[in-house]
Each structure stands twice: as structure tokens, then as C-alpha cells.
Image: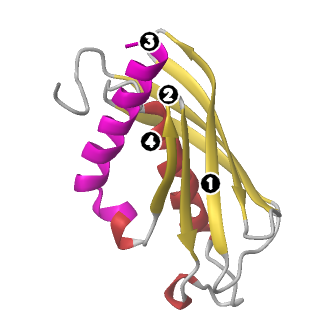
Amino acid sequence: MSHDTQAQRTAERVRDAMFANDRAVRGLGMEIEAIAPGRADIAMTVREDMLNGHDICHGGFISALADSAFAYACNSYNEVTVASGFGIDFIAPARQGDRLVARCVEVSKAGRTGVYDTEVLNQRGERVAVFRGRSYTLKGKPVAPA
């Protein structure tokens, strides 16, 4: 089995293990659309209970979606990895019924730290937000047992 195939299988095992215990992601109706080493795409449909007083999606829900894609991407190597911080910029509003997809890609991973960029798009491909997450890996702690 090639290294790429093994790395992909590892990412898929981690996805399955994380999702099984991820009450936040499941509770918000998120779906893991794609996973690969250092990458993840997660989708969520904006529900009525996610709207703020302006009738647009509350930024916290968009942040949660982006942060979730970041979490799955940076844990895809099967070492427990947590966020050390993130920043988000909102570009356009999301409305009820919009299907948002957060696409996260690894920018840098060195030692125990990493940087990941996530773009949140609506169903028309319009950018809703951009997010940069910083990760910290806890060495020697697998996400999914072998």
C-alpha cells in the first residue's frame, strides 16, 4: 500500500472516530463531505434557529462550521491536535436555507504547530467567510486507536 493510500485511510479512520463522538457537529447538522491528510470539507444548512436579529446566520455558527473543518483537517494525521487560536473575517451574509461548505487546507505544519486556512462558501460558490486557524499537536496521543 502506498504512503498516500495509507495516509488517506488514516484520515478516514480519524474522521469516523471523531464524528462518532462529535456532538456539536452532529447537533448542528454538519456533514463531512471530504477528508484527506491536512484537508477537510464540511457542510451545514442554515436553519431558522441559527438566525440572529437581522435575519442572517449568526457569526458564531459560521465560525463553528469553519472551526470544525479546521479540527478535522488538523487531526487527520491521527495525533490529537487542538486549536491554539483562530481569526475569522465575514465577507457576506448567509441566510436561512443556504448550504454552506467550509473547505480547510493545511498551509504549514512544523513540529507541534500548524496553520490552516478555511474558506466558507454558499451554494452559489460565493465566499461567506475566511478563517485562519492555528493548531497545537499533543504528541503521542492518537485520535483513533489502530
2 or 3: mark nearer the eye: 3
Q: Which residues are magenta?
A: 1-25
Q: Residues within 10 Å of mark 1 (few under 14, many from 20)?
A: many
Which of the two labelled residues, at mark 4 and mark 2, occupies the earlier sequence position? 2
Residue 22 in percent (x, y) is at: 29, 56
Give me the C-alpha separation between circle 1 and circle 2.
Answer: 16 Å
Tag 4: amino acid: Tyr
Residue 71 in percent (x, y) is at: 45, 42
Asked which secondary structure carries label 4, the reply is: helix
Q: Residues within 10 Å of mark 3 (few under 14, many from 20)?
A: few
Rendered image quadrant of residue 57: bottom right
Residue 119 badge: none
**Are the residues tagged 4 and 3 within 8 Å (C-beta)?**
no
Task: Give whichever of 30, 94 is nearer the camera.
Answer: 30
Which residue has dot 3 on it? 3
Which of the two labelled residues, at mark 1 and mark 3, occupies the earlier sequence position? 3
Q: Is residue 84 above or below residue 126?
A: above
Give me the C-alpha separation between circle 4 and circle 2.
Answer: 9 Å
Q: Is residue 71 left or right of residue 108?
A: left
Tag 3: amino acid: His
Asked whether residue 5 is drawn in magenta, I would say yes
Asked which secondary structure carries label 1, the reply is: strand
